[in-house]
Image (tube, helix red, strand yellow):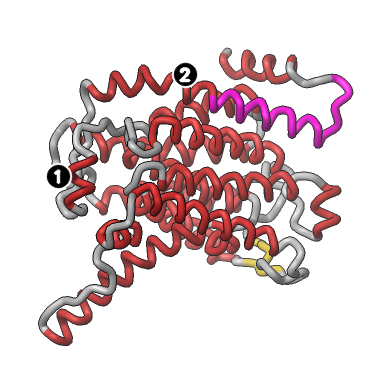
Amino acid sequence: MLYYLLQYINEVFDPPGFGVIEYITFRASAAAITSLLITILAGPRLIRYLKSKYIEPVKEEAPAEHRKKKKELPTMGGTLIIFSVLVSGMLWAKLDDPYVWLIFLSVLWMGTIGFVDDYRKVVLKIKGGLSAKYKLIGQVSLGLFIGFYTRYDPAFSVLLTETTIPFFKDLMIDYGWWYIPLVVFIITAVSNAVNLTDGLDGLAAGISGIVVFGLGGFAYLGGNTVYADYLDIAYIPGGGEVTIVSMAIVMACVGFLWFNSHPAEIFMGDTGSLALGSAIAVIALLIKKELLLPVLAGTFLIETLSVSLQVAWFKFTKWRYGEGQRIFLMAPLHHHYQMKGWAEEKIVIRFWIITLLFFLASLMTLKLR
């Protein structure tokens, strides 16, 4: 019943005489506005509720100033992002499109795992929350489902095992049997990367919004035969619907920043960071831009590398010299600059600027081919 009601609303708002491009633009804009309004209007009530029940414990290894400022703040704010995306997406996207449901699935799947992690930390007072093993099982399970579904379901007219390579005009590669392991790796890596980056007020939400906006733009271009032919990029039949859900995610992040910007009133928690990370990964895979993620989502990559290098170097020097050494004052990288005395707002804004530069660099791939 709900399905047909939402589809009826969608058809009612289909302006007569609109072309395909105008109709996609209209619905993407409507989804963005709807998502923003839901987030901003529902935010205060959710914050009041979460403050009474779900106060996130500050990590003991965090900088002292960070621990001092982040006390008594509610977490699980990612539920607001997820709710806004699902409602606005269901209202304005075509619900018979498999691309839409795969994005919804990724958001709900990893959002649920993140919620369990937050609940164990905040309510059950279990240090560390959900163990890394169970998080990995959840990520791998989602990756396997997405991989097998997109490879073998006949609803997908585009063979997703083939993809284009950034900066090269006519070079295509076919992953073959490596496609499914690649899907698992990308979903796991990106969801963990966003989770690692979520450490300062507005950092993960702002960067995620920029990255998804970029992916939504590529989905818009790839979903239209005229633009795809002109730019010589892969045509994605479901690209228009991906654009609509992407814009809902972008504005959910913007709306969340209304409350999460410094000084934050709420944290997204693993509920939000894992959901956003999986959504970014799945959108990139669906529109064949997974190889562009190291450029477009370069900030997430840098944050992840800072942790990997820190751990690897510490273990190596401890084995080699008997005492572990560090490359950074603290990892992830944003805490390194926090330890150097940079103001939190300065770190966040500079990371946003770097992400915008990565976004512009990714746009250059449309012509430097």
Disc 1 marks a residue whose amino acid type is Lys
Residue at image mark 2:
41
| Near-viewer residue (140 or 197) | 197
The overriding secondary structure of the stretch rendered in magenta is helix
Label 2 close to label 1 by CB (< 8 Å): no
Q: Position of residue 266 (x, y in %)?
A: 32, 32
Residue at image x 75%, y 69%? 369
Residue at image x 36%, y 39%? 262
- Around disc 1, counting alpha carbons within 10 Å, would you say few (fewer than 14), some (14 to 19), or many (20 or more)? few
Q: Nearer the viewer, mark 2 or mark 1?
A: 2
Q: Position of residue 190 (x, y in %)?
A: 45, 55
Viewed as shown, does residue 288 lie left or right of 280?
right
Residue at image mark 1:
127
Residue at image x 58%, y 13%? 1
Q: Position of residue 270 (x, y in %)?
A: 33, 42
Element carrying mark 1:
loop
| Near-viewer residue (139 or 198) | 198
Q: Over which residues does the magenta segment extend?
A: 16-36
- Around disc 2, counting alpha carbons within 10 Å, would you say few (fewer than 14), some (14 to 19), or many (20 or more)? few
**Residue 177, image quadrant:** bottom right
Quick check: is 206 in the magenta stretch? Answer: no
Residue at image x 62%, y 28%? 31
Residue placed farthest to the right in the image? 17
